[in-house]
Amino acid sequence: MNFCSQCGARVAQRIPPGDHLPRFVCDSCGTIHYQNPRIVVGCVPEHEGRILICKRAIEPRLGFWTVPAGFMENGETLQQGAARESQEEALAEVEIGSLLALVSVVHAHQVHVFFRAKLPTPIFGAGPESLEVKLVTPQEIPWDDIAFLSTWFALERYLEDRAAGRDEHHFVTLDRRPAGGNPAGK
Amino acid sequence: MNFCSQCGARVAQRIPPGDHLPRFVCDSCGTIHYQNPRIVVGCVPEHEGRILICKRAIEPRLGFWTVPAGFMENGETLQQGAARESQEEALAEVEIGSLLALVSVVHAHQVHVFFRAKLPTPIFGAGPESLEVKLVTPQEIPWDDIAFLSTWFALERYLEDRAAGRDEHHFVTLDRRPAGGNPAGK
């Protein structure tokens, strides 16, 4: 951030009075520009025991596999966001179910929220952000080519819980910051 | 948003190619400025059956009561954010427990995440954003002066679950948008 989005003046980075973190501050109009984590919403859609996965057509991790997920938009609920991403990336109408995973992706300034989901009819296809979309058995999941650690975590917990007949939610912290990080997951 | 935070030029609001929602776009440097929901993290801290609540010293809802909660910061997990807010608003060192509530506050472009928490020692006080902080029994909760619907929802679910010996999580959608809204909660 270089300029104030309100008035167009240059911003400076410093700790405002009464705050404890550096912020981008505009000395011209007084606006403090806060930057906060963004939410990624997704789901693990299942149809008759098989899981719907998407091969990414966009960076980052182009060519790698994921479940439908993306940035939550203003004006929608968590569940609506997860369903919308399934529509956009996999042209799939899913029914969002229970909460599966909450992932704090600290280095990326993101929180990923995954739900279980049902795909009632096996109608799907590659949306503009996908190269390929397919239903796979647990044995067919391309674990070595999964796009993100959070996707891996969600898929693993999903299958473990399904095998055990559980319907739980799971937390994990992913942190790849260079100093003092706390690497977790895979 | 009036100006591009990258290059300082004026931005225009329109739907970029391949997108489906209007965004603030800079025609000078090409940056698309996405605006996404922000996360509020909080907790319901308990000490020997009593709940820690804070009277707000800041707008919105100055003078009304809430539980410790505030915007999640970059570089922290959900749980760390909830603990930090307890420190800042109530000068309290809490132990964050299980997930209590996920609230999609659609009209405010926010998601509120509440945890159960323990206050091991009854040491607390009013931080800069609080006028007063106190431990109350369930009967003493000032229901008519609770600051936000999400706080009300979290407190109600907390007490219901505690009475029933449950440790569940709850979803709710709050939507006060003028058209097509879906009012929920209180």
Image: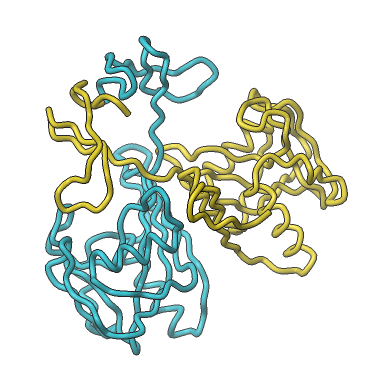
Chain colours: A cyan, B yellow
Residue A22 spot, x, y in % from top left: 41, 23
Q: Is residue A47 above or below residue B29?
A: below
Find residue B76 and report its image quarter: top left
Residue B178 spot, x, y in % from top left: 51, 47
Q: Is residue A168 above or below residue B119?
A: below
Which quarter shows the C terminus of chain A? bottom left
Residue drawn at point x = 37 percent, y = 45 percent: A38
Q: Is residue B6 left or right of residue A47?
A: left
Front in this rendered view, residue A115 or A140: A115
Which quarter shows the N terminus of chain A? top left
Residue B104 spot, x, y in % from top left: 51, 53
Q: Is residue A63 above or below residue B75?
A: below
Residue drawn at point x = 87 percent, y = 50 percent: B139
Front in this rendered view, residue B130 or B95: B130
Residue drawn at point x = 66 percent, y = 47 percent: B151
Q: Residue furthest bottom?
A: A48
Residue drawn at point x = 38 percent, y = 18 percent: A25
Q: Residue furthest right?
A: B139
Residue A174 spot, x, y in % from top left: 37, 52
Q: Is residue B165 left or right of residue B30?
A: right
Q: Residue furthest front?
A: B179
Front in this rendered view, residue B13 or B117: B13
Q: Is residue A101 above or below residue A176?
A: below
Q: Is residue B179 left or right of residue B69?
A: left
